[in-house]
Image (tube, grey):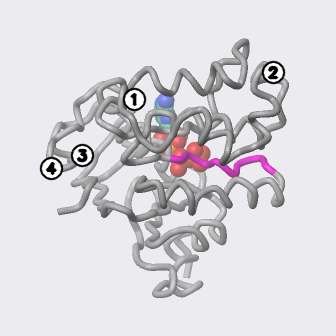
Amino acid sequence: MALLEIRGLTARYGDFQALFGVDIALEAGETLAVIGANGAGKTTLMRSISGVLANAPEQIMFGGEPIGALAAPDVMARGIAMVPEGRKLFPSLSVEENLLIGKYGRAVDGQWSLDTVFALFPILKERRNSPATALSGGQQQMVAIGRALMSNPRVLLCDEISLGLAPVVIRDIYAAFPAIRAAGASIVIVEQDISQALKVADRVYCMMEGRVTLSGAPAALTREAIHAAYFGVR
Ligand code: ATP
């Protein structure tokens, strides 16, 4: 049984249907990438898993239990943490205070603490007393990742963490992923940047218009197949 299983997931915004029966399985220890163009439904998927959007209970199974209808704080308490699109830091709080907020929702001991997050992203230790808004975009993204890690999640969801960042900054952020994996987290990343996704993921799912159009290990997917699944062209 997979650690996290999405089964026939549907989602609507009023009359508009955004997801049409999405099936995704995340095995323990695995890193998955979900790719797709603007509007494919990737963020809706992440918001469904994290409990921001409510779904039918059995559409999302975590550790064999239905969590599809749980609210976000309950999902977080069970060990699924999200790095949201746009980071959503608390602007008036310091870097350290933003990180500490990540601990409140889930009181478990584990690998991640202020010290180990600072070891992962040393620049955050230097800037620990600065307001989050005084940091560069890349540094703010590190705070958002660190905040999620502070809850010692079993699953880390990352929504478009490279959006708007320079390639060298993206590289620095992705350089943290091996340590995050080694600490035991399973990871789902949403990316529009296909090459980045193929580099980091064990398996990739491609979405288009609310459906999974392709999945497999990066080595098994041809460029042509990915293009067809991503853009709907041949
Ligand atoms: P992006 O890369 O732009 O974030 P995405 O793949 O994450 O794209 P979603 O944000 O999940 O896509 O959006 C899927 C569809 O749902 C889109 O057609 C979008 O316009 C629509 N949608 C998203 N949020 C809402 C909302 N709050 N109300 C109505 N429609 C929405």
Looking at numbered disc 1 in the image, what kind of residue is underneath it?
Val
The residue that label 2 is drawn on is 130
> Residue 125, position in %: x, y?
75, 34
Quarter-wise, where is residue 88 in the image? Answer: top right
Give the labeled residue for mark 3: 60
Foreground: 225 or 182? Answer: 182
Kind of residue at badge 2: Ser
Three-letter amino acid code at the position of disc 3? Ile
Name the element at disc 2. loop
Q: Is 21 situated left or right of 167 in this image? A: left
First along the sequence among labels 2 and 3: 3
Task: For the C terminus, give its image quadrant.
Answer: bottom right
What distance separates the C-alpha of mark 1 from that of mark 3?
Answer: 13 Å
Front: mark 2 or 3: 2
* Sooner in the amino-acid sequence: mark 2 or mark 1: 1
Q: Cβ–Cβ below 8 Å for labels 3 and 4?
A: no
Q: In 3D space, how far apart are the residues under numbered discs 3 and 4 (Cα atoms)? A: 9 Å
Q: Mark 3 or mark 4: which is in front?
A: 4
Question: Which mark is drawn over residue 52?
Answer: 1
- Magenta range is 158-165
SS assignment at label 4? loop
Element type at mark 3: strand
Give above or below for 40 relative to 51.
below
